[in-house]
Amino acid sequence: MTGGLLAQATPALQALTAYDPGHDLPALRRRFGGGGAIGGLIELGSNENAWGPSPRVLSALANAAATEVWRYPDPLATDLRGRLAEAHGVNADQLVLGNGSHELLMQLAQIFCAPGDEVLVSRYAFAVYPIAAKAVGASVVVADAWPAQHLMSRGHDLEAMLAKLSPRTRLICLANPNNPTGTWVSTAALAAFLERIPKSIPVVVDEAYMEFADAPGLTSALGLRQSFQNLIVTRTFSKAYGLAGLRIGYAIAAADVIVLVNRLRESFNVNALALLAATAALADDEHLQRGVTQVRAERERVAAILRGRGLHVGPSQGNFLLIDFADEAAPIETALLQQGVVVRPMLAYGLPQCLRVTLASRAENDRFLQALTL
Ligand SMILES: Cc1ncc(COP(=O)(O)O)c(C=O)c1O
């Protein structure tokens, strides 16, 4: 770092490794041709929505660009917050928007954790939780996940998490469904887990992929809000709503938690175009449901084909599959990339034998299946 200021940073940041976003996609797009189109690069590495946003979003953005860009956005996001609150049956003061749910996860760690505190996660949890914890000097306590042979292959073992609770636990984070495993915990199991957590410990249930879920017994933790004041649910417009590029997500929690996020967040953290786009996206349930239905169908179809080829594919409730290639994962990833198919290596998650593949359109998924010579 210039001027030798690295040594002046907090010890936590000196030791921190930044989030690994995967491949250099702009470079790959230049090499293979624009993202998404069949014949060009097939992007299955970031769990985005292959169908893109509702056409209503695109027309809202086209009309807005000329009028909105030079005004600051509504710092309170009153209109969208009101609509989301109504959609979820909560009060508007129980909801806050973030520049992606990633931002909210970072803020929640800043709010609740200090050096010496512990953030409890499961093995194979979303990579942002350890970063959020370590950035504020907290330590990350990792509970073992189910073994690969378990029905919920590599999924969160809630008993193992409970066993890791300590007087220093200040925050618990879990995604449901989880990225990168695709596994889930039932609402009943989550409720039983929350019963055993002291009410003074905030529990973040990250529902970035909840729209894609259809497993029996799996519903949003929002239904448990009344019983657990320490529950914080995060959601995003990046996945099922197809707005990853605009960066907008939200958290629903007790009003006093929202007050704390509002103290910390930059007042204009969600930009004007993102606010408009999310409002338009929310109004087009048909588009949302169409995409979700296709993801669910492709999830079954692609998993069955891969299992038919003798591969271990974990159960998934997300818009992606975690596939175990044993010793072959690295050469297979390279071979796919040479054919213009991007998937996500899992070394950073401690799963070097696995690749995570986003479920896109049938044609794109078929390109992946063809490129995979197994
Ligand atoms: C489990 C999980 N949570 C949160 C996010 C962050 O989503 P965003 O910041 O785009 O809202 C992701 C993104 O991949 C994710 O997989």
Image (cartoon, grey):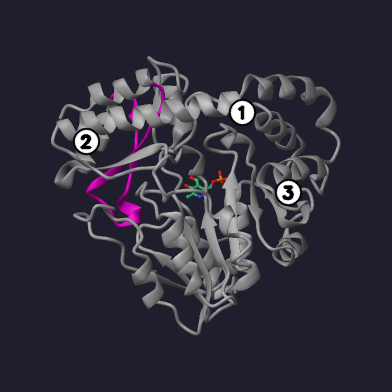
Give the answer, above or below, for where 91 lies relative to 120. Answer: above
* Badge 2 amino acid: Ile
| Of the image marks 2 and 1, the number of the one nearer the N terminus | 1
Cβ–Cβ below 8 Å for labels 3 and 2?
A: no
Q: CA distance from mark 2 to mark 1?
A: 38 Å
Whole-Å distance between the Cαs marked 3 and 1? 26 Å
Q: Name the residue at 35% across, 27% down.
A: 298
Where residue 264 sits in the image (x, y, percent)?
73, 63
Question: Looking at the image, which is closer to me, 183 or 311?
Answer: 183
User: Which dot, 3 or 1, sits closer to the camera?
Assistant: 1
Segment colored magenta: 339-361
Q: Mark 1 is on which residue type?
A: Asp
Seen at 62% across and 72% down, the residue is 112
Question: Quadrant location of the C terminus?
Answer: top left
The residue carrying pointer 1 sits among few (fewer than 14), some (14 to 19) or many (20 or more) residues within 10 Å by Cα, namely few
* Earlier residue among tags 3 and 1: 3
Residue 359 lies in the magenta-colored region: yes
- 90 on left or right of 306: right
**Is 109 within the magenta?**
no
The answer for how far apart the CA atoms under marks 3 and 2 are is 40 Å
Q: Where does the image place residue 311, in percent across and percent down from the top left?
A: 17, 38
Against 316, residue 117 (above or below) is below
For the residues bearing labels 3 and 1, Cβ distance under 8 angstroms? no
- Where residue 210 appears, x then y in whole percent? 50, 44
The mark nearer the N terminus, 3 or 2, is: 3
Q: Amino acid at mark 3?
A: Asn
Q: Quadrant of residue 156?
A: bottom left
Number of the label disc, if any, that sits on residue 285: 1
* Residue identified by numbered label 3: 269
